Image (spheres, grey):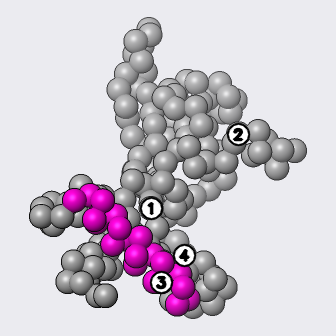
Amino acid sequence: MNSPVKSVIESILFISNKPVTLSHLKNVFDKHSNEKILSIIKELQNEYESSNRGFRIQLVAGGYQMTTNPANFDHLKKFMTEKRKISLSLASLECLALIAYKQPITIPEINNIRNVDSGAVVKNLLAKSLIKILGKKKTPGKPYIFGTTKEFLIHFGIDDLKSLPPLEEIEQVLE
């Protein structure tokens, strides 16, 4: 059964360029419970999956977002001629991984681990909104402490930091 609520949820997820939280959907449908809205999302997910549609609804960064069907990746890759919106150097990826796994972390702590000045790289990651300043450390000099952002989760297509692969797994790959 195709309800008007289901149609509206599908439209909202389709037009949104960012994940839509359950609370945001609840504000649109104040007469429906969270359980009802989640039930409709689950119904849409099952429909897309069972009919092998070109898109999916996925939980990303604490909200729901329409994504492409992973089975279509090779064709989409050929179709897309532009680079990703955010391109990252090896140094940026290294810093970003350190921040993601060790946050909250300061630039001196990053420099100590990388054995190189990382100030410019951190500034670049801030400009791309992949990291943010969380505050200042209560140590001499009061350096800024950094952590990842919601944009980081969205860019890498993960729901939360618990979705990152275990650090040991990454160390094994690097060896």
What residue is at 45 percent from the left and 33 percent from the top? 146
Magenta residues (range): 33-52
Examine the image and state in which quarter residue 8 appears: bottom left
Q: What residue type is labelled 4?
A: Lys
Q: What residue type is labelled 2?
A: Leu
Residues under labels 3 and 2: Cα distance?
34 Å
- Badge 3 or badge 4: first in the primary sequence: 3
- Badge 3 or badge 2: first in the primary sequence: 3
**On residue 167, which mark appears?**
2
* Place of residue 63 in the rendered image (x, y in percent of width and height, measured from the top left): 36, 59
- Check disc 1 and report the residue beneath it: 59
- Badge 1 or badge 4: first in the primary sequence: 1
- Badge 2 or badge 1: first in the primary sequence: 1
Q: Nearer the viewer, residue 102 or 132?
A: 102
Is label 1 in contact with label 3 (beta carbons under 8 Å)? no
Q: What is the tally of numbered marks visible in this picture?
A: 4
Is label 3 in contact with label 4 (beta carbons under 8 Å)? no
